[in-house]
Amino acid sequence: MSDPRTRLLEERERLAATARAATGGIDDGSEGAAMNELSTYDQHPADVGTETFMREADESIAESVRAELAEVDAALARVDDGSYGTCQACGRPIGAERLDALPATRFCVDDAARAEAEAVRAAGPLVDPDI
């Protein structure tokens, strides 16, 4: 495994670039200008709907990337305090292969699987049984 700080900083830069690409013009105030241009008489209503959908999709991607950036920042803090590579649930070491694949992970494979199964159970069935 490479140096964790270097790997996390590389991941941070990759995510930051993704966020910049996803937000394009969202944060610079151009959204209003774009929507004003699209709302003129000569634009088809479907064009406005498509533009709105695309902006919402971009914002959703940017929000997801911001959450991943927060995880990377938290992992960098764990590097600083010496707890990086230790599962936050059970205290056992997280495998090097897992850290290479998911450098910001907080959990070992077993606890990550357990948390995912619990989240699925908590979400309940995807289909309403009363239908």
Image: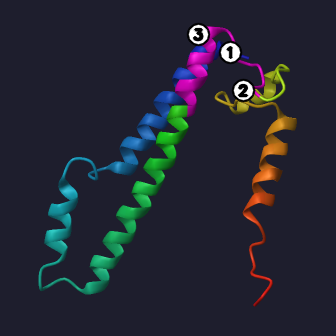
Q: CA distance from mark 1 to mark 2?
A: 8 Å
Q: Position of residue 113 (x, y in %)?
A: 83, 44
Q: Earlier in the sequence, mark 1 or mark 2?
A: 1
Q: Position of residue 9 (x, y in %)?
A: 52, 21
**Residue density around tag 2, few if under 14, some if 14–19, many if 20 or more, within 10 Å:** some
Residue at image location 41% in from the left, 57% down from the top: 58
> Observer-nearest residue: 107 or 22?
107
Q: Earlier in the sequence, mark 3 or mark 2?
A: 3
Q: Quadrant of the C terminus?
A: bottom right
Residue at image location 19% in from the left, 64% down from the top: 34
Secondary structure type for disc 2: helix
Residue 73 numbered tag: none
Residue at image location 58% in from the left, 15% down from the top: 5
Residue holding disc 3: 80
Q: CA distance from mark 3 to mark 2?
A: 18 Å
Residue type at mark 3 is Asp
Residue type at mark 2 is Asp
Q: Position of residue 87 (x, y in %)?
A: 78, 25
Query: What main secondary structure does the magenta stretch of the protein show?
Result: helix
Q: Quadrant of residue 51?
A: bottom left
Q: Quadrant of the N terminus?
A: top right
Q: Are marks 1 and 2 in contact (CB under 8 Å)?
A: yes
| Side of 56 relative to 106 (left or right) | left
| Side of 27 relative to 115 (left or right) | left
Secondary structure type for disc 3: helix
User: Which dot, 1 or 3, sits closer to the camera?
Assistant: 3
Residue holding disc 1: 2
Instruction: Give, as a single range, the part of the protein colored magenta.
Output: 71-88
Q: Earlier in the sequence, mark 1 or mark 3?
A: 1
**Residue density around tag 1, few if under 14, some if 14–19, many if 20 or more, within 10 Å:** few
Residue holding disc 2: 100
Residue type at mark 1 is Ser
